[in-house]
Image: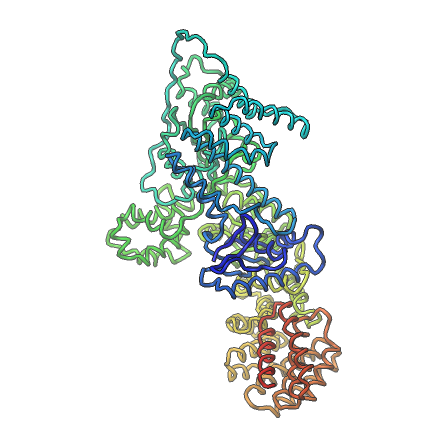
Amino acid sequence: MEFRLLGSVAMVTEDGDVALGPAKRSSLLAMLLLRPNSAVNVGQLIDALWEEEPPTHAKTVLQGHVSRLRALLAEYGAEAYGVELATQGSAYVLRMPESLVDVHRFEELVGLAGVQRQPADAVRMLREALSYWQGPALTGTVHSRPLEAAATGLEELRLATVEALAQAYGQLGEHARAAAVLRSEAVAHPLRESLAAALMLALGRSGRQSDAIDWYHRTRRLLAEELGVDPGETLSEAYATLLRAAEPAPVARPVAPPAELPAPEGLPRPPRGFTGRGAELAALDRAVRAGDGPVCLVTGPAGVGKTAFAVHWAYERRADFPDGRLFADLKGFSETPAPETAAVLREFLLALGVPDPRMPEGVEARGALFRSLTAGRRLLVVLDNARSSGQVRPLLPGGDHCATLVTSRDRLGGLIASDAARPVPLGHLPEADAAALLATVLGEDRIAAEPAAAARLAGLCDGLPLALRVTAARLAERPAWTLDAMVGELADEQGRLTLLDVEDRGVSAALRLTVQQLPDSAARMFRALGLHTGADLDRFAAGALAGTSPAQASADLDRLAAAHLLTEAVPGRWTPHDLVRLYARHLAPRADPEGLPRLLDHYLYTGLAADAAAEPGSQPCYTLPADARRPAAVREFEDRTAALDWYVAERAALEGAVAAAAALGLHDRAWRLALVQWPLMLMRIGDGWTPLLEAGLASAERIDDIDAQSRARALLGWILHAEGRNAEALVHLEKAPGLAARAGDPISEAIAHVNHAAVLDATGEHERAGLLMRHAVSLADRTGHPSTQVLTLQHLAGHCLKTEEYEAALAHTLRAEDLVAPDAVVVRAQLQIVRGEALAGIGRFEEATDQLERAIVASEKAGFPEGSARAADRLSRLSADR
């Protein structure tokens, strides 16, 4: 199985292209393939699938295309190829080997061609890369801005590859072939000056000078007529080159040889034990070769090995910079002050042979001389540990053949905007490379003896080279220690950061220097994150922790991400790596002590909003405590899907919040937070909810809140029943109705009776179950609460199916359907299933089939797979019976 984007969007099997269906489905697949193994949120997909303003039902249409695409992938055995279309919060991700996508193979070949020393090898690879193109990229997709931008970007890559192929032909002396490659593209893109310039030079070098000059004048006229501009520098220089070639050679005159400038070698010693980073080194190669006077920006978190990476690359590419290499540590994240720009320029000029007496005084004069001296040279400048773009700009060399390599813990977006810096991000080392790094210090034999422990050490060190080197140093000092013993030490989160510090180096020291450079607001936010109860968070939770608005929180989170202290793996949710999280927790005592209580109240308010969206019209699962503080803003949920996505994203944090609330003695918060995910619990009923609900019940009992105990026992009993633990379930369900009655809550009492009766029904006590269910209906009717009336009628109808009272079951569903809220789509689907089963029992098979088919559609639309499975199963049995 393969996927094609370079031409018509296609899924290709051994039998040929798979029919994807409408353009929107092709567009969905294209968006996911453009970012394989990355989450693409629903909003981005909707923007891509509609040319104009999307309709109100856009999300439903999108879900339908996702469902059909999943079915196609399953039908053609995608799982066997490692391909899976998964839901991740409010986004979708196409998990797959990237080599199955033609774009990936194309870019990989182009990258490999760029590092070949032999032009013939580059030609072969570039031709193979271009063979993947079977027409304009993303053909057959919707003409939306996101897809058109992606197609334009891919076309730019293709044209750049054509130009690279022509250049490689030229290096082989095959100028006619270079001209042939370029001509058709130059005709198709007559205003692309780089193509025209390359074609002119190829024509001239192949002996067709007049054709080359004609092409220049043709392009010049088009630029004037179409754009109203003169030829740019690239085209003008190509024309001048052609004219010089046409002039007779001047009489040679002896001239004095130019004074030789020294080739400075200012790099620090090469890093020892450097391992891995093959993909990043190749990316840096491509970035350096991609333009004139390139500025490359190596970014990443503290301790990820940016300096070692940059210096290693500089040594590996020594031959590419025959005029020397300069290095400056800008100390942007250091205990010592950053050097003055004038001082750095002075060192550079001295290295380039400028004697001290001739050294200019001012920064501007030194900068101008530096740019002048580097203008005609092939020089590498390494600017390490930069704090800001402004620190870097005065130190950039002046020559088109020079390259600048900048390392920073910050993203330095300003340098990207002003100087077209090409980012080369460094991530944490994968497991194999981390083990190899340990082996450079400890030896291959020691790693080979305990491979599982080595992998575990890599994980505990977060794949961070600095942490791995500190760990290796500790083990090297203790040759009798096993790797497994060190694993045991590091597994204790309380002491892990201490163990990962040695003398003046270590993770804590590196992170402390990063945090010291943050603006006050971002530093406060970082300390507040140490109080968080989960692994990731959104701007609302962050605002609650820090006591700011969601907008300010978002700005602070972005600043922390720019400093590589957080990552935004899923749009709108930020995550620290494990060691960063531990360091933030270490700083938590200095955070606002009200941060955690504010977070708990944020979850209480947001939980009620999510419940209302997930189950419209249902009884709230709690009332707010009297002293609950409303957050600066409460998140709004547009529909059930958004609410369920929030539960999924926040599940770990909510479970942590229950434990944190109980530890603070805030049991009135703890039991509420334990129950707040009840709509998700009922959707994923076998998903291990029992410990959380038991903790909530324990908090309710600690404060002797009988209403809370009733609600907790009713839900816990239902979950235990779903797990097949009916005896334990009945212990709670027999107590829940009486507690609700004592609390004076008839709605909770009716719900508790229904849950109790349903479990009795399942265990064979049908008569008692029927009596309790009818009592529950009576209680619900007295409350006049439609959602509870529907629930009790639905369960009573289900009981009647068991006892083969099909007419009664049908009557109860009809009455319930009159009461159900229009937006309670899951409940309506459940009623349709029961109604279909009742109709089948009566013998009204056509109507039963219609109801069950409607239930399947409604369940799929609502994201209720259990319902669609049940309806489909009943429908197939109905077909078999007939």
Estimate the x, y position of residue 244 in percent, counting from the top left. Answer: 50, 16
When the figure is inspected, residue 812 is found, relative to residue 277, above or below; the finding is below
Q: Is residue 549 visible?
A: no
Split into 4 quadrants, where in the image is the C terminus? bottom right
Color theme of the render: rainbow
Estimate the x, y position of residue 224 in percent, counting from the top left. Answer: 66, 26
Q: Quadrant of residue 258?
A: top left
Residue at 49% over, 60% down: 15
Q: Quadrant of residue 762?
A: bottom right
Residue at 67% over, 55% down: 633
Estimate the x, y position of residue 711 in percent, counting from the top left. Answer: 61, 75
In the picture provided, is 356 more to the left or to the right than 87? Answer: left
When the figure is inspected, residue 77 is found, relative to residue 356, above or below; the finding is below
Total numbered badges shown on the rendered structure: 0
Q: Nearer the viewer, residue 881 or 717?
A: 881
Q: Is residue 566 visible?
A: yes
Q: Nearer the viewer, residue 57 or 763?
A: 57
Q: Residue furthest bottom?
A: 767
In the picture provided, is 817 more to the left or to the right than 32? Answer: right
Q: Nearer the viewer, residue 265 or 321?
A: 321
Residue at 72% over, 78% down: 817
Estimate the x, y position of residue 680 in percent, counting from the top left. Answer: 59, 69
